[in-house]
Image (spheres, helix red, strand yellow):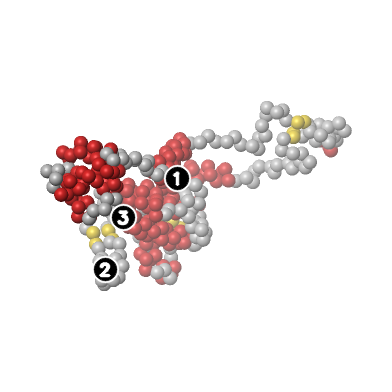
Amino acid sequence: MTKGKGKVDGDGPSRERTINWDDGQTKFMLDWCIDYMKNQHAGFKFKKQHHMKCADALNKEFGMGVTVAQVDRHFRHYKENWKYVSKALSNSGNGFDSTRCMVTISESEKENLNDRARRLLSKPIKFFYEMKELFAGTNADGSFAADQDTCMNDRDDSESDDSQGLNDMSGYALPEDITGDDSDTLPSPLSHKPGGESSSNTSRAGIKRPRGCKSPSKKPKKAKSRFSQTTEQLNSTLLSLQKFLNAPAPQVLQPSNPHASLWERLEAMTITTDDKITVGQYLAHNERKGLRDFLSNASDTTLQTWVYKFLTGENY
């Protein structure tokens, strides 16, 4: 069921109605945002246009009739929840129970929390891993500093061990700094003999790298992904469509009135307005096209003579 609130009074602004989200709808929204964020640039932030796309996806999947404001409010609700969770994990005395998906926190610390944070941290945290993947990299204040031994091992122990092994650089020797050589010049193998001996012919100059060999420090450019190519094609199509829609409409030439000169000459005659209307109504009849053609090509004297006879009834 949906709950809604109308306007407070006749002139006050109306507040967006609230809806009840079930777990399936919430997980779909968070997963959609995670998948969308993976294809974006570093430092990407969700805005109104992104929530609009998410609302469309929710309506197609569940037929919720959800609006952009409702998606934005639900998104911010879980973003605020993650701030409480990450702040609790950043305290060195706290831990994380991966079995129950709960933050282990002391009762004394709970007493200092507000009601919302206390209710959130006193029970298993729904959508913990979804919030972590979506919001862990967006806290600019550095509030998320959870211990990797207690927070990451519950997802994948082998992955954690591999990452720790890769990050441990203590067993590697420091690179030798050779001054005076540029990035494209290799030192001579005779210029660094054991004991400090060096050849006079090779101590001051290195061996130049062949032209066909690239510097190892220069990484080859990665080919564009299929998603980026599709995005560029879509943007190009939209740009062409926008130019087409913004182009001025072609001017359609209106068919010229073959009897325009007849009406102008009739208007210029020195007769009353009522007489002009009477003559015009008579000549405008569909059956008198031949008469209009004749008078259009006739001289002014012939036209005036015919008009006077028509008005005096001599023609009929």
User: Label 2 crowding class (10 Å Cα cut-off): few <14, some 14-19, many 20+?
Assistant: few
Q: Residue 154: where, in percent of width, then height?
A: 43, 49
Residue found at the far left of this picture: 316
- Against 284, residue 4 (above or below) is below
Mark number for residue 38?
Answer: 1
- Please state which amino acid type lies under the numbered disc 1: Lys
Residue to which mark 2 is pinned: 7
C-alpha separation, residue under disc 3 versus residue under disc 2: 18 Å
> Residue at position x 48%, y 51% from top?
44
Residue shown at the point (16%, 38%) measured from the top left? 287
Label 3 residue SS: loop
State whether residue 278 appears in this view. yes
Q: Residue 141, percent across and down? A: 51, 61
Name the quadrant containing residue 207: top right
Q: Nearer the viewer, mark 1 or mark 2?
A: 2
Does residue 103 appear in this view? no
Viewer-proximal residue among 278 and 213: 278
Crowdedness of circle 3 by 10 Å Cα count: few (<14), some, many (20+)?
some
Query: Which residue, given by chain and number where applicable, does mark 3 sit on?
Result: 67
Q: CA distance from mark 3 to mark 1?
A: 24 Å
Q: Nearer the viewer, residue 224 or 208?
A: 224
Name the amino acid, label 3: Thr
Q: Residue furthest right?
A: 200
Residue at 20% from the left image edge and 36% from the top image edge:
290
The answer to whether residue 196 is left or right of residue 42 is right
Mark 1 or mark 2, which has the lower sequence index? 2
Q: Nearer the viewer, residue 93 or 6?
A: 6
Q: Quadrant of the N terminus?
A: bottom left
CA gap between label 1 and label 2 equals 40 Å
